Image: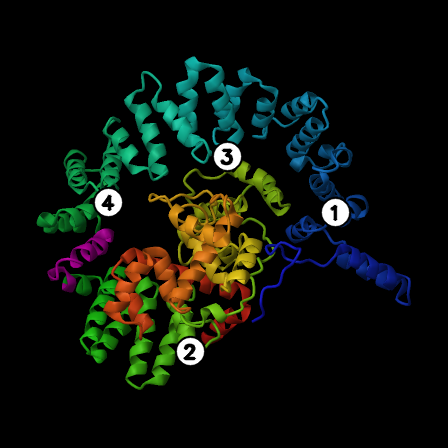
């Protein structure tokens, strides 16, 4: 694999063949001996009817190509798209030329008419012209478009704002109208702030809105429930619990109050509230989750809760038995006998196998992990079991069986940490704990964008033309508020990633059913594992002699690429540096003033800190990553307790579950980025199944 090389192109852009080179070839051929016949053939190839693929290629063109296509493309649709994209491309530097490029375009390109007029109004404002007539034209010509809310906002038509908000409640401009109305009309502030609490939770100022809302006089119990729901969606469970306690006591609010107390480390209060839910709402579907949590929180009454689950919610019984079996051995055999193929049974068998292996009984350990892998192949425990099956078979002198076990992990769980460990065990060039920093991987290149799997024609057109912010805004209104269907979740993920909300995108993609065909789309992996801040990472890792894909994977785990991320303990920025650690490294680098919220600075400081930790552990990437999360002191303690001869075993023995999970996820991220950059790895995995 070759080292990443600097490039003037964005690493996320898929190179496309220049349309100018194609035109030059056409002129050469048509003027030579091929004559008219070649001209006819070439016209058929290069100027076929527009498709999503040709639109995507068009959006990746440079200024000159767009300008040429906007004037001379043989089909009208390509000319219209090119005019729109050309105007967008030159708007910042040549607003007058951009305005001229889209003159009258809304008439020939009605699908994006509202967006063309919106662009015209913005260009007029930029040029110091009055855009009001353009905004009014948008209002009169496109009454069905939610862009009307943007026109109402630009024209400050407060009397019409309420109608726009009611018609397009989720559209971002409608929520901005509500914010403006709350300020313009203080007596109606509560109404509009409540609207934002319900429909505008994505706003950067939502915390200020919610605080302002709580300060409003005469809040009702129903008002508090709406505010509580907003805090619940934002994972602020302590605040949500207090508000739910003063909300109408429905089965849903009582469950959320209990769960909020549970997640806020108030187990006794949570248990009492779950029990109240069982007593007061005997027919509620919320009972199912309440019973599962009570199995964990109230061991004295476990049998009764398990009996109720079996009678009313049998599908959840394996989960509850798994919780009980973790602390009471008498439930283990029940779980294994009644639900042998469940994820809970797989996890239990893995724990039993590890105990047998630690006691020196490898044949029994092998029998247990074989059952785990074969009975529950889609579970996380199956990947772990499969890798250790290979390790233990290798120890018993069964190399062929060991290789088959590792190959099975790669076939069945190719995205997992244990797939990387299996690939390393098979001798693939993927790096190991001690050789990872010497790897020179290729930067992943994102695949060409694809058309959206669902949505309106306007949404699809905006997306394939790269107008992702407008597409995201439209989807807020058009999509399901709960992202109910897999296609809705997938579209939401693509659009969230397109506006750099990678945390939300990853969460949505992870929730897709395992069997969903959407997972096979080329943009699934590139959205789940985006390549972000490539230039900054390349510069820092070349200076500090680090594997760039490992740093990319570490950033993904630490902050999901959110530069402003701040942890509960005060770690900041992309690489989640504690201020005191950052200060030490900044002194080492000679930085007197720095901003941990600046991506370049944060990556620079974080990479140097990682290099320092690697130096301490003599380039042992495993111990360095564990130290990055738990601190070198804890890792030093674990090395003294467990040694460092068998690093795979060392990972399993990490006493902090958070750190063990962290190590595995960072290295799984590295592995998945490596697979994106070196497509031969995926080819080898596919060949294993043939």
User: Which comes sooner in the sequence, label 2 or label 3?
Assistant: 2
Query: In this figure, which residue is indicated by the disc labeled 3?
Result: 477
Q: Position of residue 524 (x, y in %)?
A: 50, 56
Please state the horizontal and vertical placement of residue 685, each as a whole percent of the image: 47, 72
Q: Residues within 10 Å of mark 1 (few under 14, many from 20)?
A: some
Quarter of the image that includes the N terminus? bottom right
Residue drawn at point x = 22 percent, y = 62 percent: 339
Mark nearer the viewer, 1 or 3: 1
User: Does residue 361 appear left or right of residue 523 in this picture?
Assistant: left
Would you say the magenta stretch is mainly helix, strand or loop? helix
Q: CA distance from mark 1 to mark 4?
A: 56 Å
Total marks in image: 4
Q: Which residues are magenta?
A: 315-333
Mark 4 lies on residue: 289
Q: Which residue is mark 1?
A: 63
Q: Residues within 10 Å of mark 3 (few under 14, many from 20)?
A: some
Label 4 and label 2: CA atoms lie apart by 43 Å
Image: 50 above or below 403: above
| Nearest to N terminus: mark 1 or mark 3 | 1
Q: Quadrant of residue 215?
A: top left
Task: Indicate which label's residue lies in the foreground, 2 or 3.
Answer: 2
Mark 2 lies on residue = 426
The CA distance from mark 4 to mark 3 is: 31 Å
Q: Residues within 10 Å of mark 2 (few under 14, many from 20)?
A: some
Q: Nearer the viewer, mark 1 or mark 4?
A: 1
Along the line of sight, which residue is nearer the eye, 54 or 556?
556
Give x and y (percent) for residue 286: 24, 40
Q: Say whether marks 4 and 3 touch (CB < 8 Å).
A: no
């Amino acid at each position: 694999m070759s080292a990443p090389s600097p490039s003037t192109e964005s690493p996320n852009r898929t190179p496309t063949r220049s349309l100018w080179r194609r035109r030059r070839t056409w002129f050469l051929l048509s003027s030579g001996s091929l004559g008219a016949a070649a001209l006819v053939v070439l016209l058929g190839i290069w100027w076929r009817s527009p498709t999503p693929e040709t639109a995507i290629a068009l959006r990746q063109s440079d200024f000159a190509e767009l300008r040429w296509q906007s004037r001379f493309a043989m089909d009208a649709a390509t000319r219209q798209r090119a005019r729109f994209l050309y105007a967008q491309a030159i708007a910042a530097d040549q607003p007058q030329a951009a305005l001229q490029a889209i003159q009258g375009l809304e008439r020939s390109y009605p699908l994006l008419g509202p967006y063309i007029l919106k662009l015209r109004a913005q260009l007029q404002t930029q040029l110091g012209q009055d855009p009001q007539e353009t905004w009014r034209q948008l209002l009169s010509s496109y009454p069905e478009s939610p862009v009307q809310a943007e026109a109402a906002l630009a024209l400050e038509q407060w009397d019409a704002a309420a109608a726009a908000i009611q018609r397009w409640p989720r559209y971002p401009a409608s929520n901005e109208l509500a914010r403006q109305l709350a300020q313009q009309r203080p007596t109606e502030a509560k109404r509009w702030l409540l609207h934002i609490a319900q429909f505008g939770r994505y706003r950067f100022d939502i915390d200020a809105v919610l605080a302002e809302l709580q300060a409003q006089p005469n809040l009702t119990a129903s008002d508090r429930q709406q505010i509580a729901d907003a805090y619940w969606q934002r994972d602020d469970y302590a605040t949500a619990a207090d508000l739910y306690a003063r909300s109408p006591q429905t089965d849903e609010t009582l469950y959320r109050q209990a769960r909020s107390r549970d997640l806020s480390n108030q187990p006794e209060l949570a248990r009492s509230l779950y029990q109240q839910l069982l007593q007061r709402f005997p027919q509620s579907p919320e009972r199912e989750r309440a019973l599962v949590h009570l199995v964990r929180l109230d061991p004295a009454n476990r049998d009764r809760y398990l009996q109720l689950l079996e009678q009313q919610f049998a599908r959840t019984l394996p989960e509850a038995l798994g919780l009980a079996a973790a602390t009471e051995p008498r439930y283990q055999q029940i779980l294994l006998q009644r639900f042998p193929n469940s994820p809970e049974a797989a996890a239990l068998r893995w724990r039993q196998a590890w105990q047998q292996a630690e006691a020196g009984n490898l044949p029994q350990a092998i029998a247990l992990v074989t059952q785990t892998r074969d009975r529950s192949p889609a579970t996380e425990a199956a990947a772990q079991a499969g890798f250790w099956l290979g390790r233990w078979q290798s120890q018993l002198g069964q190399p062929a069986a060991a290789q088959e076990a590792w190959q099975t992990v790669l076939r069945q769980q190719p995205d997992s940490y244990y797939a990387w460990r299996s690939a390393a065990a098979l001798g693939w060039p993927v790096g190991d704990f001690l050789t990872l920093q010497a790897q020179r991987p290729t930067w992943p290149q994102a695949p060409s964008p694809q058309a959206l799997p669902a949505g309106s024609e306007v949404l699809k057109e905006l997306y394939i033309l790269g107008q992702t912010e407008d597409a995201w805004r439209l989807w807020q209104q058009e999509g399901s508020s709960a992202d109910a269907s897999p296609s809705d979740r997938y579209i939401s993920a693509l659009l969230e990633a397109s506006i750099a909300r990678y945390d939300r995108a990853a969460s949505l993609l992870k929730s897709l059913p395992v069997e969903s065909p959407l997972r096979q789309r080329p943009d699934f992996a590139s959205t789940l594992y985006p390549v972000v801040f490539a230039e900054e990472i390349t510069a820092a890792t070349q200076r500090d002699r680090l594997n760039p894909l490992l740093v990319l994977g570490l950033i993904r785990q630490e902050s999901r690429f959110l530069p402003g991320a701040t942890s509960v303990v005060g770690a900041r920025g992309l690489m989640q540096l504690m201020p005191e650690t950052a200060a030490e490294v900044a002194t080492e680098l000679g930085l007197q003033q720095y901003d941990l919220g600046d991506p370049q600075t944060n990556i620079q400081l974080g990479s140097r800190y990682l290099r320092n930790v690697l130096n301490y552990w003599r380039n042992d990437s495993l111990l360095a990553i564990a130290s990055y999360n738990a601190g070198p002191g804890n890792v030093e303690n674990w090395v003294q307790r467990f040694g460092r001869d068998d690093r795979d075993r060392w990972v399993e023995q990490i006493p902090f579950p958070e750190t063990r999970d962290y190590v595995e996820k960072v290295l799984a991220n590295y592995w998945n980025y490596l697979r994106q950059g070196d497509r031969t790895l995926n080819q080898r995995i596919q060949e294993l199944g043939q």
